[in-house]
């Protein structure tokens, strides 16, 4: 009965980890629709204005036949441009719908199984693991490797390679000291970032301002003043302290012997901007801030973790690294590979006790059941007054054992 209970699939709990699988295509569909709507509104307005002006000029006689034909050619060219843009949006929408259908089908396969003992569950779990590995690789910049893995395992529709490739491209440009790509992304998502109250665009404009001042060129300083008036001063009520620092920066160039604003010239700000962009990007697209592989591992580790898993003696305030025990039949949390990852996850919550009822405390600190000790000692051929620790093979006299009572 107990084995059946543990083998039963709890579909809703399984799908907690797979929410981004459907949420991301939905967010991308919304973004694609907004872009298409903006294209239609913008170009339709321009076409109406040009058509009205051409008709008025033709009726009033202010425009020659050649001028009218030229305006018509211009309108046709603009409409062809609109058609190209909308075709691209339609193709993207079709791709996202196909991707969503594949993901729904993948998740629906889980509901056709009722037990982890089902032979299909192993294949489904393997495919899910491949997805998690691809997600991990993409988040760490191994885009080509992730794409090859997705192609080899035929899970292209279950992995968001293009989204993370775009993320990596903009992040790398920030780390290289360029804000243009990030500002373009901010312009495309301006309304959403404003709803999120994101500071990203302001910080990018601030960095532009800092780089202009860093040159210490008179022409660049004049440009910095114009830049501040246009892009920084409007944020006075929102980020007053940052705007004050920007104004004071003019009096303290990077060559100043004592610069109270030296931290603003620090190159590490580019790394902070990259992290800020990554955070805003993930929040906007409803992506978790950590790899899904870590979430899955943390859940599994929490089911195994006990207070004894982090009892290693410390060195300089940090627990000493235990030797690798993966693959040796020992608790994986105590291994050096997973010990740090499991350090902050909660302990396992057990609803049933599996502790032996006749526990005895051995001199080495281990606890073992009396019946198990007797069986081990008998198999080892020890005399009646001796017992053998089944774990360490240490031998003790029965007088050294202490009865343990569970409270």
Image (cartoon, grey):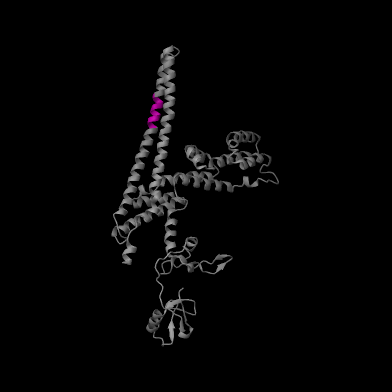
Residue 78 visible in rendering: yes
Residue 76: quadrant of the picture: top left
25 inside magenta stretch: no
Residue drawn at point x = 30 percent, y = 62 percent? 117
Q: Is 255 positioned to the left or the right of 132 in the image?
A: right
Residue 273 screen position, x and y as percent = 54, 45
Q: Please tell me whether residue 293 is drawn above or below residue 395 in the rendered image.
A: above
Residue 226 screen position, x and y as percent = 61, 33
Q: Which residues are magenta?
A: 76-84
Question: Residue most toward the top?
Answer: 61
Q: Please tell me whether residue 112 is drawn above or below residue 49 in the rendered image.
A: below
Q: Is 349 positioned to the left or the right of 1 in the image?
A: right
Residue 247 screen position, x and y as percent = 65, 39
Residue 3 screen position, x and y as percent = 32, 66
Q: Please tell me whether residue 332 is drawn above or below residue 112 in the rendered image.
A: below
Residue drawn at point x = 55 percent, y = 43 percent? 177
81 inside magenta stretch: yes
Q: Locate the N terminus and report the quarter of the image it occupies.
A: bottom left
Q: Is 50 positioned to the left or the right of 252 in the image?
A: left
Question: Residue most toward the front?
Answer: 407
Residue 129: quadrant of the picture: bottom left
Q: Main secondary structure of the magenta part?
A: helix
The answer to which of 341 and 348 lies nearer the viewer is 348
Residue drawn at point x = 36 percent, y = 39 percent? 93
């Amino acid at each position: 009965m107990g084995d059946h209970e543990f083998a039963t699939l709890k579909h809703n709990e399984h799908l907690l980890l797979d929410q981004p699988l459907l949420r991301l295509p939905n967010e991308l569909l919304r973004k694609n629709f907004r872009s298409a709507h903006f294209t239609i509104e913008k170009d339709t307005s321009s076409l109406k204005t040009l058509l009205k002006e051409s008709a008025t000029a033709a009726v009033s006689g202010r425009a020659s036949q050649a001028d009218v034909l030229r305006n018509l050619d211009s309108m046709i060219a603009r409409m062809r441009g609109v058609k190209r843009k909308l075709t691209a949006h339609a193709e993207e929408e079709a791709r996202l719908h196909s991707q969503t259908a594949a993901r729904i089908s993948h998740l629906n396969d889980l509901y056709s199984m009722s037990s982890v003992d089902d032979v299909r569950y192993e294949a489904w779990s393997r495919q899910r693991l491949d997805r998690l590995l691809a997600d991990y690789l993409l988040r760490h910049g191994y885009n080509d490797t992730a794409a090859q893995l997705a192609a080899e395992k035929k899970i292209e529709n279950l992995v968001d390679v293009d989204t993370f490739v775009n993320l990596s491209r903009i992040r790398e440009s920030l780390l290289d000291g360029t804000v243009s790509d990030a500002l373009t992304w901010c312009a495309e998502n301006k309304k959403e970032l404003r709803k999120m109250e994101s500071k990203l665009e302001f910080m990018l404009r601030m960095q532009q301002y800092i780089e202009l001042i860093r040159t210490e060129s008179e022409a660049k300083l004049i440009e910095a003043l114009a830049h501040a008036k246009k892009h920084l001063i409007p944020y006075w009520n929102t980020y007053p302290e940052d705007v004050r620092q920007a104004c004071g920066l003019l009096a303290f160039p990077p060559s100043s012997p004592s610069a109270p604003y030296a931290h603003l010239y620090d190159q590490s700000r580019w790394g902070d901007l990259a992290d800020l962009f990554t955070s805003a990007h993930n929040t906007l697209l409803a992506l978790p801030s950590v790899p899904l592989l870590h979430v899955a591992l943390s859940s599994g580790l929490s089911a195994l973790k006990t207070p004894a898993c982090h009892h290693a003696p410390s060195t300089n305030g940090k627990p000493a690294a235990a030797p690798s025990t993966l693959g040796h039949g020992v608790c994986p949390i105590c291994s050096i590979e997973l010990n740090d990852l499991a350090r902050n996850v909660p302990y396992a919550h057990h609803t049933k006790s599996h502790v032996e009822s006749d526990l005895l405390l051995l001199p080495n600190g281990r606890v073992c059941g009396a019946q198990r000790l007797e069986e081990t000692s008998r198999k080892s051929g020890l005399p009646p007054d001796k017992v053998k620790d089944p774990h360490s093979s240490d031998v003790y006299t029965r007088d050294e054992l202490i009865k343990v009572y569970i409270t």
